[in-house]
Image (cartoon, rainbow, N blue to C red):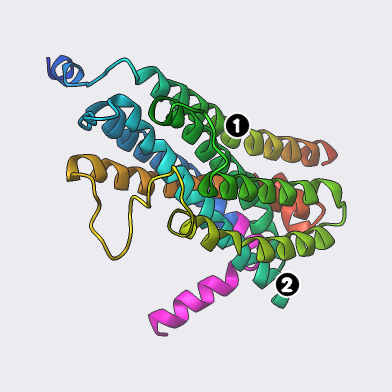
Amino acid sequence: MDLINLISEINMDDNYFYVVYVLVIFIILIFINLFQPYLKHKKILKKQRDKG
Amino acid sequence: MTSFNKVKDWFISMGSPPFLYKWIMKYLPFMILLSLLLVFISLSWGLFFAPTDYKQGDAYRIIYIHVPSAILSQSIFILMAITGGICLIWRAKVAGMLLRSAAPIGASFTLMALISGAIWGKPTWGTWWVWDARLTSTLILFFIYAAIVGIYSSIEDKTKGDRAAALLSLVGVSMIPIIKKSVDWWQTLHQPSTFTLTQSPSMPPEMYLPLLANVLGFYFLFIALLFLRLRTELALREQRKNWFKQKILGD
């Protein structure tokens, strides 16, 4: 019930899709910045472990 | 030992790659979780629960991503210039790594500020882009970031790459006061700074408090992303060192 009350308080109008565009681009950029170095680090560790 | 000496010792030990790597490995998961949680809460506050602007409607909510991104794009460059100076004067290896790790994150936040500004410009100014002072100077800052990232890709010798990037960051930091003062020095479409040290914000607290929370959240996010990139950079440059091999095989 609290969650329903909380969601009903959300304010939106026709311009909201501009905000959604920005939010989607922001999430994509953050994911790239999180996963690119993570995967690179993982690759280096794997290479070193394979070398023994 | 006084607390000042303790901090000094800690700071000096941060210049040692094995110590820094161990320290990052310890705090990285906590920093990522904390920063993502902070950004999620502050963005939800701003995007869903802050009041609607009577003139711009909901389009103004872009401010909650645009302003923190723009603030970070400038702060990160100042950090890069400081580390660039340390790198050139004291030849500190870790300073070069820090500079290299911060550059792509700074470029991402500058790109985010430019894109979010363009998307915000459409409903408010009626155009995606104008060649006004604030926008153009921020675009130049993005090109400098891109040049620094490019230097590292094109120069194979890491030490030479560090020095070239450090020099460019020291020259490029002159763009920061130009960007900051561009809205005062030239006639622009862009509004004046949202936050200043001398005046209270022109927005009501229900709007600027979520903005302050977002700025804080974005700073934490930057630190977490910097830790992540610095860890990778340390592993890349130190992978042939004994301490690194021992650490990898020991885990």
Residue B94 colored magenta?
A: no
Relative horizontal placement of residue B240, taking residue B70 as reference (left or right): right
Residue B246 point in image, percent of width and height: 73, 52
Circle 2 marks a residue in which chain? B
User: What are the residue bounds of the magenta stretch?
Assistant: B1-21
Majority secondary structure in the magenta region: helix
Near mark 1 (Cα within 10 A), the count class, few <14, some 14-19 or many ≥20, is few
- Is residue A43 depicted above or below B82 in this figure? above
Q: Which mark is residue A32?
A: 1
Q: Are marks 1 and 2 in contact (CB under 8 Å)?
A: no
Residue B239 visible in the displayed image? no
**Which kind of residue does numbered mark 1 sit on?**
Ile
- Is residue B81 depicted above or below B102 in this figure? below
Q: Secondary structure at mark 2?
A: helix
Residue for point 58% across, 57% down: B77
Q: Which residue is mark 2?
A: B88
**Quadrant where the image shows the N terminus of chain B:** bottom left
Residue for point 33% across, 31% down: B61
- Is residue B123 depicted above or below B112 in this figure? above
Of residue B201 and residue B242, the one placed in the foreground of this image is B201
Near mark 2 (Cα within 10 A), the count class, few <14, some 14-19 or many ≥20, is some
**Which kind of residue does numbered mark 2 sit on?**
Leu
Quadrant of residue B130 within the rendered picture: top right
Of residue B160 and residue B13, the one placed in the foreground of this image is B160
Residue B141 point in image, percent of width and height: 62, 50
Residue B12 colored magenta?
A: yes
